[in-house]
Image (tube, rainbow, N blue to C red):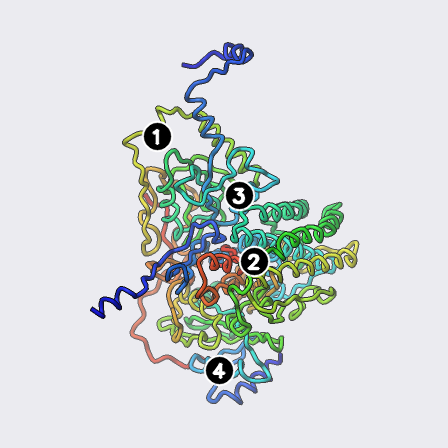
Amino acid sequence: MSETALHSQEPQLLEVSIGPQHPSTHGVFRMNVVLDGETIVKLKPVMGYLHRNHEQLAENMSYLASMPYTDRLDYICSMTNNFAYATAVEKLAGIDVPERAQYIRVLMAELTRLVNHTLLVGFLLNDLGAFFTPILYAFREREKILDFFEATAGSRMMCNYFRFGGLKSDLPAGGLEQVKKIVNNYSRFLDEFERLLTNNEILRSRCQNVGILSKELAVSASITGPMLRASGVNYDIRKVDKYSIYDRFEFKVPLGKVGDVYDRYYVRILEMRESIKILQQILKQMPEKGEIISAKGAAAGKSPRMWKPPAGDAYGRIESPKGELGFYLVSDGTPKPYRYHVRPPSFINITILEDMCLGYKVADAIIILGSVDIVLGEVDR
Amino acid sequence: MNIEEIKTDLLKHVPGLELTVEGESFVVPKEKLLETARFLKENEKYRMDYLSCVTGVDYLAARQGQPGQAAVGGQSELASDYLESVNHLYSMEKKQGPIVLKVRVPRNNPRMPSLTPLYRGAEYQEREAYDLFGIVYEGHPDLRRILMWDEFEGHPMRKDYVEEDQDVR
Amino acid sequence: MAVDEGLKNELQKQGIFVTTLNEIYNWGRRSSIWPLQFGLACCAIEMIATACAKYDIARFGAELFRPSPRQADLMIVAGTVTKKMAPMVVRLYNQMPEPKYVISMGACAISGGPFRDGYNVLKGIDRYIPVDVHIPGCPPRPEALLDGLIKLQKKIDGQKIDQMDGYKEEKNCEYPVPQYGKKGLEPMHNPDTFTPRLDWPEKNTKGNLRMPNYKPQAAPAAPKPQPPPVQP
């Protein structure tokens, strides 16, 4: 009798698959969770539902032909993807970039950072239950920046603007005025956002002390980007590698204390303010005239199917809004890369999703996933 | 970071290590990979605590004999068939790097030790290298397919993989 | 029995509104299409942008994106459909109640798009489910999505209640869900919805993409003891 009594008290675990079609999984991402009541006991992410074999395609095309495909990796921040790829190829082939092109590159990268962090705050609030209102605000600001991208690069989202050794074309007439307007109004928009959100009781009680990530685990799990900095580790590739001309600008690197969801949200708000500072400095320092692409780069772009970089390998990385985005290229002296690999920040940041979610409820797991900031195009490539 | 300096340190502190330098990376035999990585992670001078990128490369000899092509991997002669696993190490504490470690395994028996006991971040990247190239990492806690479905057969990113033709009636 | 236009206008001036049951039924259906919240990839962001304030889809009555397929009547397949995801898409389509419509948004959903040549990409979702409107673009602008929605609304206007496929008793509601095979999906396509054309000029999915002239060699002999991997 004692055996049956014991048996009936054992918890019955329920296995649920959240996704791949789910309103809050940020794309086709699936989490197999094992629940004890409402508490998570085990969590296994399943991905690959958007695996579009980007790396295999790149091995069959010339180097420049993969540039439009890099737009579609992290489809919210297409400019920084282009930036990382251009950096990697320039490292491989030893191509330099002229002054004005460098300034415009950093301008595009920081505007993309603004877009990405704004959207993240919108989507995180959507996961919390504030259905669609913060997204409306976020997309309203994003549309202004996209108008500028469209005027410069020709397309709203998939810009394909960077070339090896520079850019595709110069800014349009009136482009800088557009940027000035965006930058001047953005602080006020951020103040409005913050007034509604940062000290909001619901946000605080749901996000503070949820999904805590310790420093040691973050470093060991190769986490990068705002998620790492929210746990208190000071590592920003813009300051460490000093790629492009980031050493000419003064900006701080905001760090979090606890490493919970609230810290990750707040670090991104502070990073947006630092980006606005960088943009203001760019607008002051940018040279009026200058070349847009260097001579070597122009030669590479003229006949991309004949351009051969030297044999060897190179790993170029930048600080994309989500973390460290790197490209590993192996060249064999032919116009097509022998091996082309993308080091995606979202893919690696999910490594410790299970560790962060254990012991919390399903609703918390959704916002922890939201705070990691993944984009499936990057996770699955 | 000076390549020669790193090489001398590695040869001094890791017993029985045979290194070669190719370009700016070190080719390490697979038996010594964990020891080398542990030394680089714990030594005070280097403190390489951040494993940035783990990836596989397929060096197929038949692929490399194409006309107009230089030998891949910086070698002077065409290499035999092997799979390679490339690891990029950086230091978050000292803000230095990268140190690149390459390990080569033969195609018909691609087994090598996993870096997951030292670096958690290698977990998913090694699973991906297993899924797409077939490199088996010994010591990995959960080695199964990550991007393709479980019933899939073959390793798609290898150079000699033939895909199905979707346009048959 | 349709009413004469002139008579209709005359009666309207007198405050009498005349219509047919078909017209008003279709008007109700097309003015409040509820899409399924189903974004796969980049096109999903443009779909959300269409739903936002600048390109308001609420003007067309379609702003209520339902998370559950049981409550939706339009599935906008936005983004690349991979072979791993295709069974889920078909299953979701089967779960939607009649009458249901599918919009294929973006080049990837129409035919595989820029990612066509690959081992994991399905060359268009119309291989398994019937599609009503195709919207080309990569990604299509929000205005293009609205244009596609208007075309769908016109299509709905032209349907007749007694001839609609979805209401017939013998209609087969379950489209077969493909299973994961060794290299792809089985079956490769649904013959009711798709017939592959075999006379396309470029057959770039045949054979090995990376080495077009590669002939696989004979299987190697028993493995010899390996030479040391370090090259002198």
Q: Is residue B166 above or below residue C55?
A: below
Q: Quadrant of the N terminus of chain B?
A: bottom right
Mark 1 secondary-structure assignment: helix
Residues marked 1 and 2, same chain: no
Marked residue nearer the N-terminal end (4 or 1):
1
Residue C165 is tagged as: 1
- Asked if residue A112 shows in the view, the reply is yes
- Disc 3 is attached to a residue of which chain? C
Q: CA distance from mark 4 to mark 1?
A: 73 Å
- Disc 1 is attached to a residue of which chain? C
Q: Which residue is mark 4?
A: C232
Marks 2 and 4: which is nearer the front? 2
Residue C47 is tagged as: 3
Q: Is residue B165 above or below residue B158?
A: above
Marks 4 and 3: which is nearer the front? 3
Residues marked 3 and 1, same chain: yes
